[in-house]
Amino acid sequence: MFFRKPSGMDWIVVFLGNPGPKYNETRHNIGFMTADVISKSTGTRINRLRFKAYTAHCTMGGKKVFLMKPQTFMNLSGQAVQPAAAFYKIPPERILVVSDDVSLPVGKLRIRAQGSAGGHNGLKDIASRLGSEEFPRIKIGVGAPEHPDHEMADWVLSSFKGQDEKNIESAVLRAAEAVETIISAGINTAMNMYN
């Protein structure tokens, strides 16, 4: 009997969001929006259900890349990422995560080689299940609520309006470019270009 070896992947890119149409275009789904841009630019449909995620693979900068949109809800994202990482034998430093960040102004990018979850439940779950915080991430600013009594959960599940919407459209395009830059030229180059 023959067992197929997993076709070697060089990178996993994880785009964080919540599944279901009611979360489309919300602040928490900025990762999914970035995935849609990459899907178009690479001519890849991220629609194959594997590891509790919609997935696809493509080539970027000569590297084989496994793309993931976890379908587990944000705070359980690691349930999708950990089995994929184990299957493809990808170490944390080659698992790139794209997420929202309420501590950054709307549309600002911050790229980090590693670091704490900073209160983000998706990043926290991935770090916990991988047993490491040493994975690169692209954080896209979605702003914070203007009023301190505004529920954070309601804020991240709200959509963008007016100028924020324009800023986010441009940020998502830059984040998609940053993904390709990290894979083809390295994280330091990407940090210099996009931070």
Image: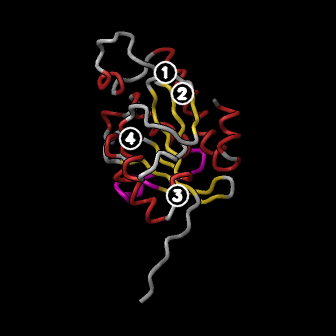
Q: Residue at x 54, y 21 (%)?
A: 167
In this rendered view, identify the residue nearer to me: 115 or 71: 115
| 10 Å crowding of disc 2: few (<14), some (14-19), many (20+) | some
Q: Residue at x 51, y 15 (%)?
A: 163
Residue type for callout 1: Glu
Residue 165's label in the rendered image is 1
| 10 Å crowding of disc 4: few (<14), some (14-19), many (20+) | many
> Which residue position holds label 2?
169
Please, what secondary structure does the residue beneath circle 4 have?
Answer: helix
Residue 169 place in picture, x, y as percent: 54, 27
Residue 35 place in picture, x, y as percent: 50, 43
Q: Quadrant of residue 173?
A: top right
Q: Earlier in the sequence, mark 2 or mark 4?
A: 4
> Which residue position holds label 3?
91
> Which residue position holds label 4?
124
Q: Is residue 110 above or below residue 59?
A: above
Query: How much space separates mark 2 and mark 3, taking CA atoms?
Result: 31 Å
Q: Residue at x 37, y 58 (%)?
A: 51
In this rendered view, identify the residue nearer to me: 101 or 159: 101
Query: How much space separates mark 4 and mark 3, taking CA atoms?
Result: 17 Å
Residue type for callout 2: Glu
Residue type for callout 3: Pro
